[in-house]
Every structure is written in C-alpha cells, then in structure tokens.
Image: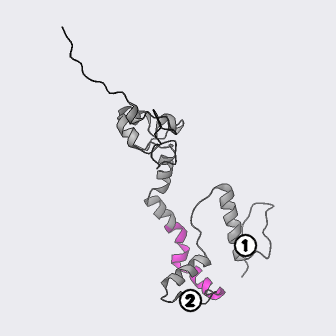
Amino acid sequence: MPLFIGLPHGVSLPRNLTEPDARHLVSVLARSYQWTGPLFGRTEVEAYLHAQLDDPDSLPPQALDAVTWRRIQDTTAWKNLAATARRSIAAADVLGQALRQAGLLCRQCDTPITGPPTATWGLCPVCLNTTPLGDLQCAPCPGGDGTSHHRWATTTCADCHMPNPAAQPHLTAVTHAA
C-alpha cells in the first residue's frame, strides 16, 4: 500500500525509507528543533505487548507483521490516540506549567509576564506587590528550571539575586530614654 506524504514543495523522501529510518528522522528533527512529545508506533505497541506477557520471551521478535499492524492502525482507538494524548496534556496543564516555570505566566494568576524571570520572580506586578518576601524566598528559584530551590550564597541567591533570608537584618526594639 503506497503512502502519500504531503511535504513542502521541493522536499522528498527516499523511496526506500524504512520505518526505523523514519523514526530516526523524526527523532533527529525533534532534537534539532527542541520538539518534545511521545511518538507512538509499532515499537511502542510491541513493547506494550511484551509488558503484558507473563513470559516476554514468548513473543516473537517481529510480533506485528504488516497485516496485524494495519489492523491496529484501522481501529478507532489508534486513530484517536493523538487527540487523546493532547486532551490529557491539556487536562494536566503541562503547557501552562512550562509557561509558569519559564516565567512567562504569573505563578499565581496566569497573567502574561514580560521581562526576565529574575526581575519578576515569576509574578505579575500585582501579585509581586502583594506577596511577602518570605513567600518569594520559599518559592522555586526563577533563575533555575522553574522547580529548583534557591542556591543561597552569603547575601543572595546565586542564580536570581533574591536576598538571602539569613542575611536580612533583624531590628531589635530599643527603649527610648526620656
């Protein structure tokens, strides 16, 4: 069964491109462009089949021949796999988490933020002005990956320059003599 693959004008695939070669090509493109996400194909189905067996060695090495693989591809579940994955990612708010950890959305109210994360500390101006310094010091460091703790140096965090809680001066009340 010939495959029709719509590619941009002038781009063509070799006629002898095998499934493992295609998988490798997609992997290289994903790394090159920093794309991420699961890729589901025959390899993942075979791994799933192996995991379901009491004796994984009883499954032949090429368990999915062309006919069996086509039967799986023709199912409604397989055809809906990408949409199901997208809904799961949306329901888990994975993209929102990435945007908040990158300092592009406010950690508290999801307002878009401009400026470097070390200047906003991951908060919009309204939330930044109403958040106590102690809460900011306990939050993930905006100079890191969005989940890491601050790396406290003598007076500030080494990554975002937030004041070190231990370096804050403590004021002591003094009685005033009249």
Element marked by disc 1: helix
Give coordinates of residue 121: x percent, y percent.
Answer: 46, 38
Tag 2 residue = 57
Q: Assign the magenta stretch its main secondary structure.
A: helix
Q: In the rendered structure, does residue 120 fall within the stretch colored magenta?
A: no
Give the residue at x 54% y 37%: 116
Give the residue at x 24% y 21%: 173
Badge 2: few (under 14), some or many (20 or more) residues near its Cα, within 10 Å? Answer: few
For the residue marked with disc 2, what is the amino acid?
Asp
Magenta region, residue range: 60-84
Q: Disc 1 and disc 2: Cα gap in Å?
A: 25 Å
Q: How many marks?
A: 2
Visible in this render: residue 110? Answer: yes
For the residue marked with disc 1, what is the amino acid?
Asp
Q: In the rendered structure, does residue 63 fall within the stretch colored magenta?
A: yes
Is 148 or 110 nearer to us in this picture? 148
**Do residues under tags 1 and 2 come within 8 Å of each other at their CB atoms?**
no
Residue 35 to residue 42: above or below: above
Residue 7 to residue 144: above or below: below
Residue 9, disc: none
Residue 21, disc: 1
First reached walking from the N terminus: tag 1 or tag 2: 1
Give coordinates of residue 7: x percent, y percent.
Answer: 74, 64
Identity of the residue furthest to the left in this view: 178
Visible in this render: residue 126? Answer: no
